[in-house]
Amino acid sequence: MNSVFADLPNTVFDVMSVLARELGAINLGQGFPDDPGPADVREKAAEALRHGYNQYPPMMGLPTLRRAIAAHYRRHQGLALDPDTEVMVTSGATEALAASLLALVSPGDEVVLFEPMYDAYLPIVRQAGGIPRFVTLRPPYFRLDAAALAQAFSERTKVVVLNNPLNPTATMFRDDDLALLATFCERFDVTAICDEVWEHVTFDGRAHRPLIGLDGMRDRTVKIGSAGKIFSLTGWKVGFVMASSPLLKVVSKAHQFLTFTTPPNLQEAVAYGLAKDEAYFLDMRARFARSRDRLSAGLTELGFRVLPSQATYFLTIDIGELGPRLGCADDVAFCQMLVREHGVAAIPISAFYAQGAVCNLVRLCFAKQDATLDAALDRLSGLMRSRSA
């Protein structure tokens, strides 16, 4: 068996979701909304399924969607992309990540990874034969640091993977962070693979800035987006890859032998959705911000220390002082206690680290109905009462 995968444990998301089902817990662990998504986009998919073309679409994606992607990013991020040579559709952002890493990493190449990180990065890098070099980001701001980058980058570095906005911390890198990373990419001739699936789920007036738009990065960046996150349709698995033609040509070869293509009816619906006016995106952000604020206020009132959430579906609580009082040695023990004794599933952020784990942070998903959040808060109030008993 391939040791990269044979030795992997079940993901923490699977473990906590199984426990939530078995115990009847409220699942604030896995990151998906509990509503069906925008009705008009879903109706477009149904219409295309009933009346459209349901055979293999082009490997690079339907031309209508590729044009829509280019137009969308021109309007929202000021990017000039050629839909014919610089845009590709994938079966979700994870497939886009796999195709990009398998295409751009050769055995022995070093790959810089920022931790905490999405759990798919490391096994894909190892499967490609890459050698991971970790840069550990620290709470509460999770900023980039020039000294840490200098230790990680070398003449052997070929790729750096950047997740911005950052899951699981719900933070966004500042312009000076991005500029710092760009200087290292240029200095060492490194390609950046940018996982930007949360680019539209940002709050408090913050605007996402793509690394590909910075000076010197246009031809050395692979940008990845996700319709699932943009439209809260996480099960659709429609991703986008954007890069200069030479980069995308190689990435497309890996994509060809991973999934080859993506359901055409979903592609048609996403093309329709990407053309929505600004009101949709503003309303979507406002709706999630209200849910964030509802959960954050409730947790704060109960006595939890809540870290700021700038983006994504998540917020983080710091259990550094609370955990030991409840007999929990770390965030994993806390989450086990929380789901088993109080009926709320959460995710320990240490699961997103490979070596420099922070063990006092827990991630909660707020992309839920008010009644779900209120029920979770009610259960958590029992935990806080037990602390003071």
Image: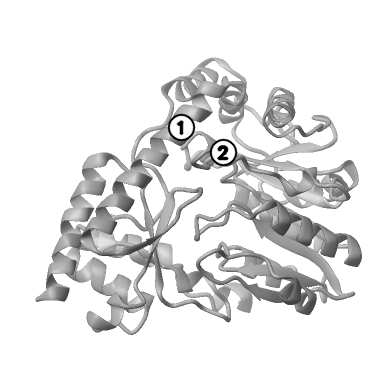
- Discs 2, 1 touching: Cβ within 8 Å: yes
The image shows residue 216, relative to residue 353, as above or below, that is: above
Disc 2 marks a residue whose amino acid type is: His
Report the Cα–Cα distance between label 2 and label 1.
9 Å
Disc 1 marks a residue whose amino acid type is: Met
Residue 168 lies, in percent from the top left, at 50, 60
Disc sitting over residue 200 in the figure: 2
The image shows residue 243, relative to residue 49, as above or below, that is: below
Disc 2, SS: loop
Name the foreground residue: 220 vs 309: 309
Q: What residue sits right under mark 1 in the picture?
A: 284
Residue 338 lies, in percent from the top left, at 25, 68
Q: How is the image coloured?
A: one colour
In this rendering, would 325 be left or right of 268?
A: left
Quarter residue 237 falls in:
top right
Disc 1 crowd rating (10 Å Cα; few below 14, some 14-19, many 20+) is some
